Image: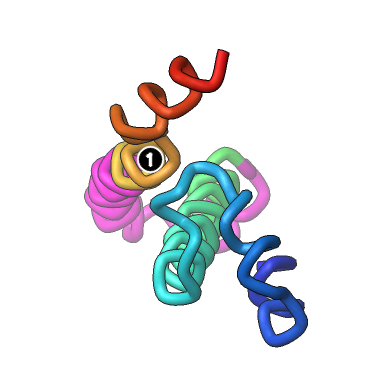
């Protein structure tokens, strides 16, 4: 998000050095910032399920719902993590460019 905040002030040369190159455009940066935010939100939800006082306060009838929600959140967390890792992985072309420079 920091890069998005200063994007209007970056020149082309500064944008070209952003790595991985797949994030060197405003739309990609915006997308990954949303994905990371969603991932952090899920982490907070799952932490609430570890809080015994919270679980007692909501009552035993919610246990089934929370179990299903927890499973769904874990699945979504895995999906988000994989998508973020894929976006952050350097492209094979970038690896070739770096090797060529050496």
Residue at the image position 31 percent from the left and 33 percent from the top: 93
Using the rendered view, name the quadrant where residue 94 is placed: top left
- Mark 1 lies on residue: 81
The residue most toward the bottom is 8
Task: Please indicate, yes or no, whether residue 77 appears anywhere in the rendered image.
Answer: yes
> Residue 58 or 74: which is nearer the viewer?
74
Where does the image place residue 5, in percent across and percent down from the top left?
A: 72, 79
SS label for mark 1: helix
> Residue 23 or 48: which is nearer the viewer?
23
The structure's colour scheme is rainbow
Where does the image place residue 66, in percent across and percent down from the top left?
A: 34, 53
Q: Which residues are magenta?
A: 51-80
The residue most toward the front is 101
Residue at the image position 45 percent from the left and 48 percent from the top: 21
Q: Main secondary structure of the magenta part?
A: helix
Using the rendered view, name the quadrant where residue 62 is placed: bottom left
> Residue 68 or 102: which is nearer the viewer?
102
Residue 16 in the image: above or below residue 71:
below
Question: Does the magenta-highlighted stretch encompass residue 66?
Answer: yes
Residue at the image position 24 percent from the left and 42 percent from the top: 75
Where does the image place residue 92, in percent across and percent down from the top left?
A: 29, 28
For mark 1, does the 10 Å Cα neighbourhood hold few (<14), some (14 to 19), or many (20 or more) residues?
some
Which image quarter is the N terminus in? bottom right
Which image quarter is the C terminus in? top right
Task: Please indicate, yes or no, whether residue 67 appears anywhere in the rendered image.
Answer: no
Question: Does the magenta-highlighted stretch encompass residue 63?
Answer: yes
Using the rendered view, name the quadrant where residue 61 is placed: bottom left
Asked whether, in this view, residue 53 is left or right of residue 41, the answer is: right
Where does the image place residue 84, in percent across and percent down from the top left?
A: 39, 45
Residue at the image position 44 percent from the left and 41 percent from the top: 88
């Amino acid at each position: 998000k920091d890069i998005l905040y200063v994007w209007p002030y970056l020149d082309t040369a500064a944008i070209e050095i952003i790595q991985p190159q797949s994030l060197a455009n405003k739309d990609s940066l915006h997308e990954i910032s949303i994905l990371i935010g969603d991932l952090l939100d899920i982490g907070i939800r799952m932490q609430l399920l570890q809080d015994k006082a919270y679980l007692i306060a909501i009552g035993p009838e919610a246990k089934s719902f929370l179990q299903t929600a927890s499973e769904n959140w874990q699945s979504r967390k895995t999906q988000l993590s994989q998508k973020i890792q894929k976006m952050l992985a350097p492209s094979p072309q970038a690896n070739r460019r770096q090797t060529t420079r050496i």
